[in-house]
Image: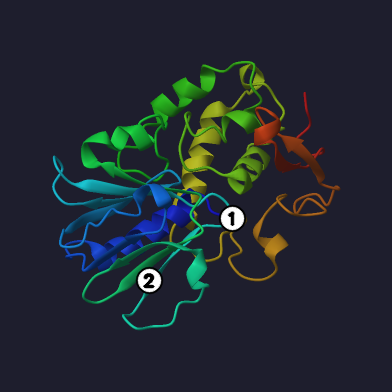
């Protein structure tokens, strides 16, 4: 499941092969941008903002940004020129080629081409990026506290509060902080710890291919998480509750918690 750590790794992988290179092919397979051709321009860098990926091309004043969001199914691959793709061609949404590599975005949930001057139109609404160079814990806390009636499990997924956390991390952060995800923000006693844990977990996992919140990076899927996707709590063996939690019907997501370790007070 794509979360901020995935996108951080993808950005670094793409930056390593694209930054400073001249595009010799630019194929954006979205009807609105089908005529866009950025070939001949230099890629300045590739960066992540929360779960968003930004490929900055050309100069800051007149250049463009290819902005993407993976949603649930999206991914970016790097291939050698002439190498066979590992996903079907018809699922490709963006193809960028430089002298040494071909970068392909498959099944991207969001894909748009913007002026570099309009970068904030895509990501300006986001809260502090948990893995970003400008991480601001105080601002993240301020934004979270501005929603006193909202369940903490909803507030942590709201990218306007802090950017980068997805469903796995919100479940695991709440478990480690011993907070029920349905607890209203106003009743959360250790919000600072929740924000600190959010930062620590993503930092610990940003270079890992197998995400883990327990310190176990190998083995069965359930061994790597305390409650997410588990039948029983890894700490106390109580049956894990699987419920639905979201700001509205369109945002409902599975949530996992241990009723023993995380009682709703």
Q: CA distance from mark 2 to mark 1?
A: 19 Å
x, y percent for residue 169: 59, 46
- Image height of 86 relative to 237, above or below: below
216 sits left or right of 226 in the view: left
Position of residue 151 measured from the top left corner of the image (x, y, whole percent): 66, 25
Residue linked to disc 2 = 78
In the displayed structure, 35 sits above or below 117; it is below
Mark 2, secondary structure of its residue: strand
Q: Residue at x 81, y 46 (%)?
A: 240
For this view, does 212 lie left or right of residue 70?
Answer: right
Dot 2 and dot 1 residues touching (CB under 8 Å): no
Residue that label 1 marks: 1
Q: Nearer the viewer, residue 5 or 44?
A: 44
Residue 179 seen in render: no
Residue extending farthest to the right is 239
Res 32 seen here: yes
């Amino acid at each position: 499941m794509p979360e901020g750590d995935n996108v951080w790794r993808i950005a670094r992988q793409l930056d390593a092969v694209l930054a400073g290179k001249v595009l010799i092919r630019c194929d954006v397979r979205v009807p609105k941008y089908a005529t866009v051709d950025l070939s001949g321009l230099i890629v300045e860098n590739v960066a992540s903002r929360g779960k968003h990926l930004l490929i900055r091309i050309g100069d800051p004043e007149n250049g463009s940004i290819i902005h993407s969001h993976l949603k649930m199914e999206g991914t970016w691959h790097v291939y050698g020129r002439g190498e066979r793709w590992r996903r079907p061609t018809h699922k490709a949404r963006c193809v960028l080629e430089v002298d040494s590599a071909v970068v392909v975005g498959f099944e991207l949930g969001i894909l748009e081409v913007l002026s570099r001057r309009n970068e904030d139109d895509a990501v300006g609404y986001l809260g502090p990026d948990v893995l970003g160079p400008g991480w601001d814990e105080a601002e993240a806390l301020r934004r979270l506290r501005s929603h006193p009636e909202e369940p903490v499990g909803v507030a942590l997924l709201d990218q306007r509060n802090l950017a980068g956390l997805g469903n796995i991390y919100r479940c695991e952060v709440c478990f480690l902080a011993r907070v029920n995800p349905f607890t209203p923000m106003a009743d959360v006693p250790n919000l600072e710890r929740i924000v600190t844990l959010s930062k620590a977990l993503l930092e610990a996992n940003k270079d890992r291919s197998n995400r883990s919140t327990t310190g176990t990076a190998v083995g069965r899927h359930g061994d790597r998480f305390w409650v997410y996707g588990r039948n029983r709590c890894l700490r106390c063996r109580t049956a894990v509750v699987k419920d639905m939690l979201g700001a509205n019907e369109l945002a409902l997501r599975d949530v996992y918690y241990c009723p023993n370790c995380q009682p709703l007070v």
